[in-house]
Structure formats: structure tokens, C-alpha cells
Amino acid sequence: MLPARYHAQVVIAATFVLALLLAVYPLPLSWRWWRPEFVVMVAIYWIFTLPLRTSLILLILLGLFQDLLEGVPFGQHGLALVIVAYICLLSYQRVRNYSLWKQSCWVFVLVGIAQLTDNWVQAMSGRPLSGIMFLYPAFASACFWPICYLWLEAVRRRYRIA
């Protein structure tokens, strides 16, 4: 049996692995712009819920691994995750008391910032920009946030992570 501290880390790591799998799950071309940013949403949840257990080093490594999985410029997702994590750490005490729909609006802003960072890195690497379509995943993430939040909350309670 694992100690409680390691048990919590295993469950948190499992949620990030599931988010990574959902991030690269193949979708039809017409739906790819509407894929929610699962890794960013899981990071937002764990920072809001357990800010002292979510490490920025872990998020950088997770972002670098996501870069390798998706074949994008190295450091793109790591930079976006660190920026979002910093904003979350500044605002988690206030935002976690919001209603679920207000949190969805905040998730739209955070994922929009992550998408803007990703778009900036893409432009720096010489790839063509997508116009305003880079905000579609932010909108999809905001719509999906209540489901993601309730599922992660059920996982946290089921495994007694505090």
C-alpha cells in the first residue's frame, strides 16, 4: 500500500496522462479546432484545488512531453502552462469560490491566454497563423469545464486527496 502522499501523486499523474491521451486522440479535420485543451483544464483544476501540490517543474515537463506528442515547437505548451499556472496561483483563492459558470468564464480567459501563447510561438517558428480560430478551443474548454470539474472533483473525493 502506498503512503497517502504518493497515492495522491499517482492519482494526479493519472489524470494528467488521461488528459494527454485526450489531447492527441484523433478527431475528424472539421472537429480539430473545437477540441478542448484537456491538459490546461486539468492543470487549472489541480492548481485551484491543491495549489501546493502542483509543481511548476511538473507542468513544464508535462508541456514538453505534450510538445513531443503533438509535434509542435519544443517549449510551446510548457510556456503556456507556466503562464496559466502563474495566473492561477495569483487568483485561486478568489476564483475557487465562484460559481461553476463564472469559473467557466475564467477558464475561457486562461485557455485563451494559453492559446495566444501557443499562437505566438507558432508565429515565431514561421508557421501560418490561424486568425481568430485559435479561440475555438478556449470556447470549447469553457463549455466543457463543468463536466471536467465535476469529474475531477469526484475522483478527488473517491481517492480522498486533500
Image (cartoon, grey):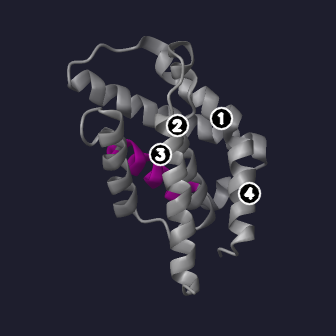
**Mark 4 residue crowding within 10 angstroms, few (<14) / some (14–19) / many (20+):** few
Image quarter (top left, top right, bottom left or bottom right) of the N terminus? bottom right
Marks 3 and 2 in Cβ contact (< 8 Å): no
Marks 2 and 1 in Cβ contact (< 8 Å): yes
What number is the disc on residue 20? 3
**In this orientation, which residue lies closer to the viewer: 128 or 90?**
128
Query: Could you tell me which residue is drawn at 47 percent across and 45 percent down?
Result: 20
Q: Secondary structure at mark 3?
A: helix
The CA span between labels 4 and 2 is: 19 Å
Q: Secondary structure at mark 1?
A: helix
Would you place residue 39 above or below residue 117 in this image? below
Query: Could you tell me which residue is drawn at 27 percent across and 21 percent down?
Result: 123
Marks 1 and 4 in Cβ contact (< 8 Å): no
Pointer 4 residue: 97
The CA span between labels 3 and 4 is: 28 Å
First-in-chain label (3 vs 2): 3
Q: Amino acid at mark 4?
A: Asn
The nearer-to-camera label among 3 and 2 is 3
Which residues, given as a range, are shown in magenta? 78-91
Pointer 2 residue: 111
Horizontal side of 72 relative to 159 (left or right) equals left
